[in-house]
Amino acid sequence: MKDARILKRERFSPLTYGMLGICLILTMILCVSVGSVRISFSDTVTAVWNGIRGLPVPAQIPKNIILNVRLPRVLCVALSGASLSLCGAAMQGLLRNPLADGSTMGVSSGAALGAVLAMAAGFTLPGSRYGGVTVSAMAFAFGSLVLILSLAYALDRSLATSSIILIGVIFTMFLSALISLVVTFASDHTRSLAFWTLGSFSGTNYDQAKLLGVTLVCCGGVIFHCRNELNAFAIGEDNARHIGVNVRRVKLTILITVSVLIGVCVSVSGTVSFVGLVMPHIARMLVGPNHRRLLPASLFSGAIFLLLADLTARTILRPIELSIGVVTSLVGAAAFIVIFYRTGKGR
């Protein structure tokens, strides 16, 4: 009953989404404007607006930098941040564990292993430059999930949360060792693979942004459809089962959806840590624990956070670009300590 009372707490105002939306748009414009070449706010807005409408961009505005280099990268970063944060919120609600995330389940590591193997072997699909990496990442992410669930089912036929998380953590450690082994022996690609495994959006394009967008719409739609079931899980699996929730079906649906979404994100940017782990907690502070409001807030907050992290990664040591995973890990670890300190103090 304590969880039910917590779920009823509301800190939501209709202005919250409006503020988050405005912050996201302003952050995207800031990220397009700032870089090795500084572009004014008005020129950025003009170039993007004219590009959307199909109108010519004034000659004095660096159209190529804005529309062909920075804008696709910003779109990919925003969509990846939103996707990872949404996955984290869904996993934490499903497993009732503040440490739950796609990476905790081994899904991120599985996707990273598939992508690394595809890049090291030069695996491609006809007519698609990135299709081989994406398909391989999704296949390994899904395969990792199937293996983890199979092991958990063999140990505990009820698919208890503790069993899934424990096996996921062990499996993640094992896959991390395999990734390091592949990177070590892929001598021709060692530097690029090592940089990619830490997370990088360098060189992303509109095709990858479209892939991320379509995947987020499809998989995000499934997760939003399960928002009431996620609220039911907040009061415990047994109580959720008693009120008519098909616990096993909901678990499998969300876990499979998360694996697909994370697999696509990893294929584009590599492994980006702490977004799905920390940002749902931030969103929960803003709008409360009800998943009807938490899931949209997680989308916005994850996108904003990753945009600012990517901006920091490519400008703080300019012209050297840091891996975005370095920035998210440093900021995320500190934020996570503060969050749990405040949570423990409040209790």
Image: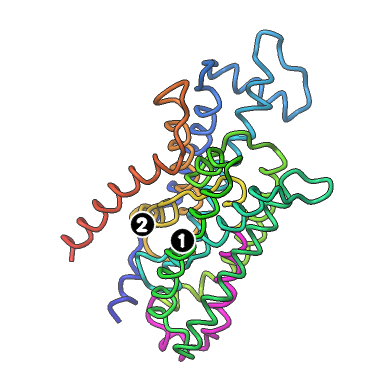
Q: How is the image coloured?
A: rainbow
Eyeballing the image, is 5 above or below 65?
A: below
Element type at mark 1 = loop
Q: Nearer the viewer, residue 271 or 5?
A: 271
Q: Nearer the viewer, mark 2 or mark 1?
A: 1
Q: Position of residue 122 (x, y in %)?
A: 71, 47
Q: Which residue is mark 2?
A: 281
Q: Quarter of the image containing the C terminus?
A: bottom left
Disc 1 marks which residue? 103
Q: Quadrant of the N terminus?
A: bottom left
**Count of picture labels:** 2
Q: Is residue 246 magenta?
A: yes
Q: Residue at x 67, y 58 (%)?
A: 136
The majority secondary structure of the magenta stretch comes to helix
Q: Which mark is residue 283?
A: none
- Spatial CA span between label 2 and label 1: 16 Å
* Amino acid identity at mark 2: His
Res 199 seen here: yes
- Displayed quadrant of residue 4: bottom left
Which three-letter amino acid code belongs to the residue tagged 1? Ser
Q: Which residues lie in the magenta part?
A: 234-262
Indicate which disc, 2 or 1, sits on the residue closer to the N terminus: 1
- Where 259 sits versus 125, above or below? below
